[in-house]
Image: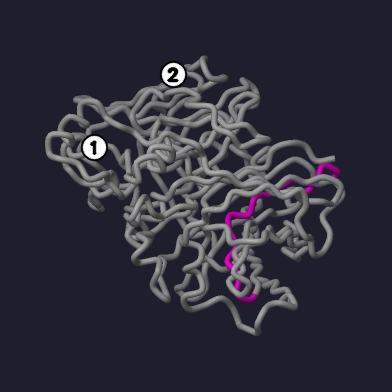
Amino acid sequence: MSATVSPAAPPSAQPAAHASGAAHRLGFSTLDEEVRLDSLDVEGALPPWLAGSLVRTGPAKFEVGERRLRHWFDGMAMLHRFSFSDGRVSYASRFLQSRAYTEAQRTGRLAFPEFATDPCRSLFKRVASAFSPSLTDNGNVNVSRLGDELIAMTETPLPVVFDAETLEAAGVAYRPPGQLTTAHPHHDPERGELVNFALHLGARSHYRFFAQRGRSEQRLIASVPVREPGYVHSFAMTQRFLVLAEFPFVVNPARLALGGRPYIENYRWKPERGTRFLVVDRHTGKQAASLRTDPFFGFHHVNAYERDGEVVVDASVYRDPGIIDALYLEALERDLPGLPTAQLRRFTLDLDAGAVHHEAVVDEGLELARIDYRRRNGRPYRYAWGVGHRDGGWLDQVVKVDVQERDVRTWSAPGCYPGEPVFVPDPASDREDAGVLLSVTLDAHSGSSFLAVLDAGDLSELARARVPHHIPFSFHGNHFGGAR
């Protein structure tokens, strides 16, 4: 069963069945302007209880000097903050003042290697950098809270602290126990810690899970040796376990050091290895299971929980890592970029039998998925919200999945491309889908963006807060602060 919610086009919109063609290209064009606006124009009405701020990061500058960066993941990070009070919305944006950004601005050249773009270096400098690696701090993937501070994160171990009000950067927060990490940490509310993963590369490489309390207090939870590490973008956490899906997209550590290629181009697809689920006990640090199943590739774990001796893991996965090639800017600038579809798939790990069963939850594609993180992360849940695409073009609809009933709802608007929908719960209700979704949306007709505020239950549109310029397509963000 499925349902679709398509609101009427705003007066400024031209008639169109849905976004198509090359209209999405604006989302991959540079935004140079930094602004502070005390009040945005709001169409519709915000819930009176909505307060706090939505803070997001994402690539906003795709050139360094005269050089065009190669991949969506390479763009220089910009922070965006939407703040809510008494039915009003303010907005601010600022480039993340990282070393990577400031050096690029100062010299007009790329100073640090990014995901798929490397600085031009001599052979001598490439070899030297292998022994003293220069890592980017271009935090364009996600925003999280560390104690009372906010941090912008990417997949290198240099999370940047920034001020929630001014968006001014204040240096690197801490260094994880490895050369690579994820921008998708989990928060342990009982310990007051941020829990994350790091890959330590060396003659003997290790997957490491660690906990961070504030800037200075770090605790190693577990360390598991690995010969050929997989590409890891996220992991799952239950009340007892840490769960890592090791997809068979792997790298020889020596190749990373001396291969002479951009970071991601050193990885190789080896489907014969299958997907390995590594399960670690959070409390003892011991490996609880290592289970293999069919080969998949994915960026995002959606949620995981324990059930009668099993661990249930839901993830958005692809048949292979072709999605990475599809996100090179050259491919994205085609009329129809031909994105592979991410499938929400349920993996049931039988720890006693050492077996993995997997199945599709729904047929609808789902990426950048969110849940009621504050109340459901690591526990049984019912609803996930994300984005998907309908015609081989760019992501053009918000998707809600009921994982119990296997039901799907969608929201779309003519000429619009919604981003990750961040769920904010209604404080007056215990219902899991009572609240709103906040999605930064590109309106290709007007050439600008707006914050879409949707009812998380039925996906009806409650309000749009319009920004006077386009916001390039970003990845992730979070809502901080209370709801009245």
Q: Quadrant of the N terminus?
A: bottom right
User: Can the viewer see residue 451 in this picture?
Assistant: yes
Q: Specify the amino acid type for callout 1.
A: Glu
The magenta stretch spans residue 296: no
- Among the 4 quarters of the image, the one containing residue 124: top left
Q: Position of residue 198 (x, y in %)?
A: 39, 30
User: Can the viewer see residue 309 in this picture?
Assistant: no
Give the farthest residue toward the top.
Answer: 217
Q: Which residues are magenta?
A: 414-431
Q: Residue at x 18, y 39 (%)?
A: 255
Element type at mark 2: strand
Q: Which mark is residue 30?
A: none
Which residue occupies the foreground of this view, 33 or 69? 33
Q: Residue at x 42, y 75 (%)?
A: 336
Q: Position of residue 419 (x, y in %)?
A: 58, 58
**In the picture shown, does residue 74 fall above or below 184?**
below
Which residue occupies the foreground of this view, 144 or 287? 144
**In the picture shown, does residue 424 fall above or below 102?**
below
Q: Which residue is mark 1?
A: 228
**In the picture shown, does residue 115 fall above or below 283?**
below
Q: Residue at x 52, y 22 (%)?
A: 212
Q: Which residue is mark 2?
A: 220
